[in-house]
Image: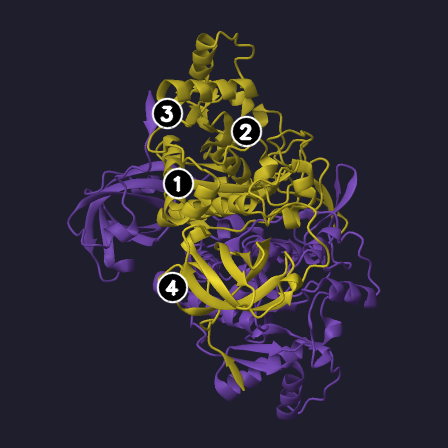
Chain colours: A yellow, B purple
Amino acid sequence: MEFMTGVKPKENKELSELINGMEGAQVKVNGAVHTIRDMGNIAFVVLRKREGLLQCVFEEGETQFELRNLKEASTVEVMGVVAKSEKAPNGIEILLKTITILSEPAETMPIPIAKWKMNTSLETNLNLRPIALRNIKERAKFKIQEAVVRGFRDFLFEQGFTEIHTPKIGAKGAEGGANIFKLDYFHKPAVLAQSPQFYKQMMVGVFDRVFEAAPVFRAEKHNTKRHLNEYTSLDFEMGYIESFEDIMEMETGCLQRIMKLIEENYEKEAKILGLNLPKTDEIPCVRFDKAKELVSEKYDRPIRNPYDLEPEEEILISRYFKEEMDADFVFVTHYPSKKRPFYALDDPEDTTFTLSFDLLFKGMEITTGGQRIHDYQMLLDKIKARGMETEGMEHYLMAFKHGMPPHGGLGIGLERLTMKLLDEENVRETTLFPRDLNRLEP
Amino acid sequence: MEFMTGVKPKENKELSELINGMEGAQVKVNGAVHTIRDMGNIAFVVLRKREGLLQCVFEEGETQFELRNLKEASTVEVMGVVAKSEKAPNGIEILLKTITILSEPAETMPIPIAKWKMNTSLETNLNLRPIALRNIKERAKFKIQEAVVRGFRDFLFEQGFTEIHTPKIGAKGAEGGANIFKLDYFHKPAVLAQSPQFYKQMMVGVFDRVFEAAPVFRAEKHNTKRHLNEYTSLDFEMGYIESFEDIMEMETGCLQRIMKLIEENYEKEAKILGLNLPKTDEIPCVRFDKAKELVSEKYDRPIRNPYDLEPEEEILISRYFKEEMDADFVFVTHYPSKKRPFYALDDPEDTTFTLSFDLLFKGMEITTGGQRIHDYQMLLDKIKARGMETEGMEHYLMAFKHGMPPHGGLGIGLERLTMKLLDEENVRETTLFPRDLNRLEP
């Protein structure tokens, strides 16, 4: 009888092991042949490994292999001796003794994935996504994205939040509207979740503080550089707040943790991407109406609609705070009630506005959040005042009927945050497999 | 101008702070009124907080509040003095000075959520999910579920895996078949992902090792205790494996980490649920055909179909290994090729079988995994031999055409694993908001 006892140490070395004083040692290493530079008697065979690139030196007579039998994009296991090399990535190289082919490609690459910049159009990149992502810069973007999610979760766990998994198929959309994907669920009409809003609020009554990092679905017909029809939403909701500023404080803490994690654990990828981390030690807050005034004055731009922010105004608000106080992030608070969903809590001092906010990052909204109504009757009144029906919201309302603490929360668009962090122009650049009006594949 | 600088220390105390030598201190605490036991001159007001229950002592004359104005399910902020109390949960109580109501319920609870056992039917529990989960035992189940996901992720991060987010809407199902939810995607036919299988394999070519914890959708018409139409799948896929046992080793490591995390960080919830952690130090492995023989002999049961496992056989295999070697988990290996998807790698020594496995836990399959075909031509041949079409798989095949390392992976059903861990009989018990043939709400 055989038993599994856990992960056994492997003979094959990873990059982080090789760079740790292994000079002179004979080692086994595997990887994908990223590129081959044939110099005549010797050749540089660069392996792509999960931790980075590894230069291997093929030498006629020394390496027991016929170089012409080695193809780019093959995967191999090699044996050789570790040597220092200032010019090689990570300062080391492997002097090859043997090469064993693990697998070979059937065709050569249609794009130069081994180049620093591939110079392909975004459209081509997306069409060839399964292989385009093998480019070192492309790959690094999604390690940074990983750091964003990790930092978000790590921080919230420390702050006493519970991670939840809420259903993505439901009988009715949380926030209603036309932007809902519909499907047939065993001959019953069903929809895909636009957000975990209702569920996370209900769960505040159970766990006080909850979060979820999961896909959401928006059937919006916008085909812009900032819209996706499916994206990853980082959501949290917290009870017993004293004011909606508690939520902004928590988000600031999340952002600080994310930047720290990138600095400490994703240094390599940050360097590959030339990443300049934004300041998160203090994030300015400005009222919605005040923000409109400030940019109208400074940039000599008339206020056309006092109750909505145009994308250009978001850009100008960010520009204002960058110029005035070198801030990359700015919280815009007190959005007009008529532009927020029914569950947003109106400001008791002026019910035209809500106790809510957006977070702008380099000119783009990456978060919407705020305090919610927690009183059952107030919620019913607001639903009625908006001419909405409670039908389909019975379970949501049940939580309120039986007592809910004051609470609020937010949702962060993961791909947008990553996009702005990396100074990309299109959210598709920081989405592994984007879904938009025209794209369902790959 | 106001600035956000991160999370500020709060005046209100959490349970873990209160039990840490605060006797005699006057403190502020908030929470939901879980239950009130009126004893005449004094009353015990138990608050439900995210870390557990907190007993507060109301005393006529000492507490500035009219007890009759306090309702169960209200949320409150109280002020009082911390005192030791052997009979109270966590060994402390608060001698109340003031009570401030934060919110009040509109109706009394339809179920006794403050009781240890609510004695409601599963159907009622699920219908009243938003409030039924406020029961301490119900809530604890999902903290254990959280630990499962955390342990899975923590371990895989350490092992060099990259977390990915793959699309749930696609043009075609990964594994085909009839169990696919269909939807209209801007007048184009689309489907919901049954698994991240194709994407995680493609990403092995990019990151070597990847994982995802995300929802999957199965339009199966089974209405059993173990089936859900939407569930959370813990998936990983790893490249450069030497054999499919590498995958089982990795899963064993994940399970060991999960149990350790529960032991160290979820002690409270494990106690509430009377959880006995299963042994994960060594997990027996048995071949599919051998397993069938063993239980057929021991339990005197004829082998009806040599190429499939009946649910009863899964139960008997688990029973066999429990009886013979006190094992709760057992890996069943080498499943018949005809019962595995096309991408499963056949055993070169006998192509009737595959280099694959299921993990059984207390009689139920909680994982399916195995080595995959990595050679492009072999994959094309298998697709052809099965009479399948490559149409719609162009992007998947692209990864193989351009070279893929030997690889394999698995998918773990989160709700099933939690169910078996907690010795529950129905997977709906360990699903926050289950989706089945008849249930789309809440």
Helix or strand or loop: what does disc 3 sit on?
strand
Residue corresponding to mark 1? A259
Residue corresponding to mark 2? A342
Q: Tell me if I can see residue B116 in this picture.
A: no
Question: Mark 2: which amino acid?
Answer: Phe
Callout 4 and callout 2 share a chain: yes
Circles 4 and 1: CB atoms closer than 8 Å: no
Q: CA distance from mark 2 to mark 3?
A: 27 Å
Pointer 2 indicates a residue of which chain?
A: A
Question: Mark 4: which amino acid?
Answer: Glu
For the point 35% across and 49% down, the residue is A158
Helix or strand or loop: what does disc 4 sit on?
loop
Q: Earlier in the sequence, mark 4 or mark 1?
A: 4
Circles 4 and 2: CB atoms closer than 8 Å: no
Single out the mark in the foreground, 2 or 3.
3
For the point 65% across and 43% down, the residue is A192
Circles 2 and 1: CB atoms closer than 8 Å: no
Residue corresponding to mark 3? A284
Q: Earlier in the sequence, mark 3 or mark 4?
A: 4
Q: Nearer the viewer, residue B264 or A329?
A: A329
Residue A315 location (% of width, % of height):
51, 21
User: Quarter-wise, where is residue A30 in the image?
Assistant: bottom right
Single out the mark in the foreground, 2 or 1.
1
Q: CA distance from mark 1 to mark 3?
A: 18 Å
Q: Nearer the viewer, residue B309 or B284?
A: B284
Question: Mark 1: which amino acid?
Answer: Met
Q: Residues within 10 Å of mark 1 (few under 14, many from 20)?
A: many
